[in-house]
Image (cartoon, grey):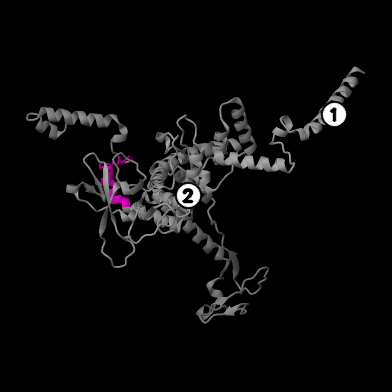
Amino acid sequence: MRNWIDRALEPFAPGMVARRVGARMMIQAYEAANPSRLHKAKGETRSADMALQVAGKPLREQARWLDENHDLVTGLLDRLDERVIGAHGIGIEPLPLDKNGKRHRALASRIKARWAAWSLAPETSGELTRPQMERLVARSWLRDGEMLAQKIRGRVPNYRYLTETPFALELLEADYLPFDFDHPERGIYQGIERNEWRRVRAYHVYKQHPGDRRGFSLSTKRVPAENMIHLAHRKRIGQSRGVSILHAVLTRLADLKEYEESERVAARIAASMTMFIKKGEPHMYGEGGESGGTSGAGQRMPDGGRTIPVGPGMMFDGLMPGEDVGTIESNRPSALLEGFRGAMVRAVGAGTRVGYSTVARDYNGTYSAQRQELVEAQLGYEVLQNDFIDGWSRPVYRDWLRMEITTGGIELPDDLDPDTLYNAFYLAPVMPWIDPSKEAKAWRELVESGFADEAEVARARGRNPDELKASREDEVRINREKGLVFSSDAFHEHYGGQANAEDRQRRRDRRAAADAADGEGDTD
């Protein structure tokens, strides 16, 4: 196990030689750690920040280019928007409690109304509603790896709030936070200023987007950490900046795009080829290569060749002596294309927390197989949902509510338990039902057996339980006023008013008569 270096050092540093030999034996004990011709054993020794110092910007730019030019990536990110954020954004159900531990419904209703009003124009430009803003934020976060938002609160020079609440968000792409802004003596690395415990103190961001190219100097400004939201997709401990969710599949996606383009070009070329004319023997032609036979059909070209118009159902009898017509067989598009592409898309889904069927839009399979895939994919969506809620939705909601209370938009009642003021249930998109009848039957059995409640069922359908209950109350009240009775309203069957007593008695009499008739028949 010793080499010539070990033998040379052994008389002077035997301890070091022993450590060298021990380390070599440990490496050899793990086959995967031993580089070979077939196994290159590549490794990453840099810190998380140093690895992204070089790769962060190129990864972000490649992901954006694919989002703009590759339909597969556009569809993948669209589906992540739908599954993580949804059409209505992350719903928030306030849950403040009174001093008796019961939900304070009056305060919750007031918070909900004010939140809905602010959601119409939550960001500084006024171009986006809250659901639109959250979808763009989530797309930038997952595609670019990170995004930022500066909190605008109180009086700000030259700015007018678009809602009654003096609180808004200025959305910033990841480009505003420079990778190369380092001042180690001030604790600044990659534009983020930290203390000795790595707690963020401030962000140093560009005043304008560096990609605008409008002739301005790239000056920065310091934004305290309490005024900034930094939503980052991190993969390692101690990682300051985020990395694109596509980072592990970028090469595969680029190769797949080029392969599909090559197949399409080959198929177009093959489709353009119709036939060829095989000439006769050389002695059948005179000087200049022209045949001595009939001129044949077609148009004579200046160089001595000819063109033959081709049309559907045509008949051609203008071949010259010794000529024959042949067709070009094409194997494009390749019969292996679909299987190869499916395997590549499956690998892309595995590397991005997205199910294969979702990326490929291929929903063939049994109910059990589809549900199994949907359940497994939903687990990945829920991880991203919780990350988004923790990094974005909860901070935004709490800062907004704090500003509402500070400015008097919401008055706190005397019987409120102050420790529960910021309690809320965050409603993200739920797993869709594949077979509604089976899903509904399962939920009904859980509720009837006491293992679930009505609120849980409503949330599983993406509904706010209070809003659903209020809607049902209005619906039932209007139906009763108009004399409409449906099977969903059991009140009329068991606890109906006096006006329905005679009708119920007639139904009981008819049932009794029918039972008596059945009994007489059995006796006979």
Placement of 240 over or under 211, stated as above or below: above
Q: Which residue is painted at 25% across and 29% down in the image?
A: 26
Which part of the image, by quadrant, shows the N terminus?
top left
> Horizontally, is 243 left or right of 334 in the view?
left
> Residue 475's x, y, as percent?
66, 42
Residue 365 seen from this side: no
> Horizontally, is 153 left or right of 479 in the view?
left
- Outermost residue on the right side: it is 524
Name the quadrant containing residue 387: top left
Q: How many marks?
A: 2
Indicate which disc, 2 or 1, sits on the residue closer to the N terminus.
Answer: 2
> Horizontally, is 287 left or right of 296 in the view?
left
The magenta region covers 38-56
> Residue 470's x, y, as percent?
59, 41
Mark 2 surroundings within 10 Å by alpha-carbon count, few (fewer than 14), some (14 through 19), many (20 or more): many
Q: Which residue is painted at 55% across and 38% down in the image?
A: 465
Amino acid on which disc 2 is placed:
Leu
> Horizontally, is 454 left or right of 171 in the view?
right
> Please, what secondary structure does the residue beneath circle 1 have?
helix
- Outermost residue on the bottom side: it is 302
> Please, what secondary structure does the residue beneath circle 2 have?
helix
Question: According to the image, label 1 marks what residue?
Answer: 510
Residue 318 seen from this side: yes
Question: According to the image, label 2 marks what residue?
Answer: 76
Amino acid on which disc 1 is placed:
Arg
Name the quadrant containing residue 291: bottom right
Disc number for residue 393: none
Q: Nearer the viewer, residue 362 or 517?
A: 517
